[in-house]
Amino acid sequence: MELIGKWKIKKVFCITPDGMKLLAPEEIPQGEDYDEYRVMSRAVFDFRPDGMVYQLLTPEDFISRDTGEEIQLLDGMAILEQHPWKEENGEYYYHTGMEGETGDEPVDPYEKLEPDEDGCLPMLEGLILIEKI
């Protein structure tokens, strides 16, 4: 699997009137309760050779989130989040940003990226599925 490059959202975990589902962006229900899901479904993940992955939105989508955050741009796209990634023994890991302890054990902030049978990557503990652009 080649990780470097841009990946788009193939499916996003969404709470719907019919229950919790992984939905393609075009399947997300209409209505303002789903606006954030629709915006997030347009995000792009850019895995860079320097060991950083950027979650990017168009500047318009970033502003529509109305968080008051200052926009930082990368290649004309707004940076929503950035996290390190690493390769160890031919396997890829993504830093989730989660830190702390569970009981007496420190939480490993790195999540293994394992492609599914279609070459897509489940991320954020399965809350999204991304595919290479």
Image: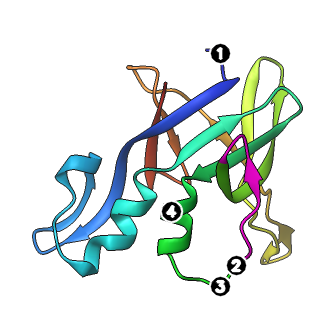
Distance, label 1 to label 2, CA atoms, is 32 Å
Residue at mark 3: 68
Task: Give the class, few, some or many, for how many residues have Cα within 10 Å of label 4's Cα (few <14, many ≥20).
Answer: few
Task: Give the class, few, some or many, for how many residues have Cα within 10 Å of label 2's Cα (few <14, many ≥20).
Answer: few
Q: Quadrant of residue 129?
A: top left
Distance, label 3 to label 1, CA atoms, is 35 Å
Which percent across, then down, holds residue 23?
Answer: 25, 51
Contact between marks 2 and 3 (CB within 8 A): the answer is yes
Q: Nearer the viewer, mark 1 or mark 2?
A: 2
Q: Nearer the viewer, mark 3 or mark 1?
A: 3
Residue at mark 1: 2
Badge 2 element: loop
Q: Nearer the viewer, mark 4 or mark 1?
A: 4
81 relative position to 14: left or right: right
Mark closer to the chain start, 2 or 4: 4
Residue closest to the eye, 67 or 99: 67
Under mark 3, the amino acid is Gly
Mark closer to the chain start, 3 or 1: 1
What residue occupies the far left of the structure in this picture? Answer: 18
Q: Quadrant of residue 38?
A: bottom left
Distance, label 2 to label 4, CA atoms, is 13 Å
Residue occupying image coordinates x 41% and y 62%:
39
Q: Is residue 67 above or below residue 48?
A: below
Question: Is-magenta flag for residue 75?
Answer: yes
- Magenta segment: 69-76
Q: Which mark is residue 60?
A: 4
Magenta region, main secondary structure: loop
Residue occupying image coordinates x 74% and y 67%:
98
Residue occupying image coordinates x 66% and y 37%:
46
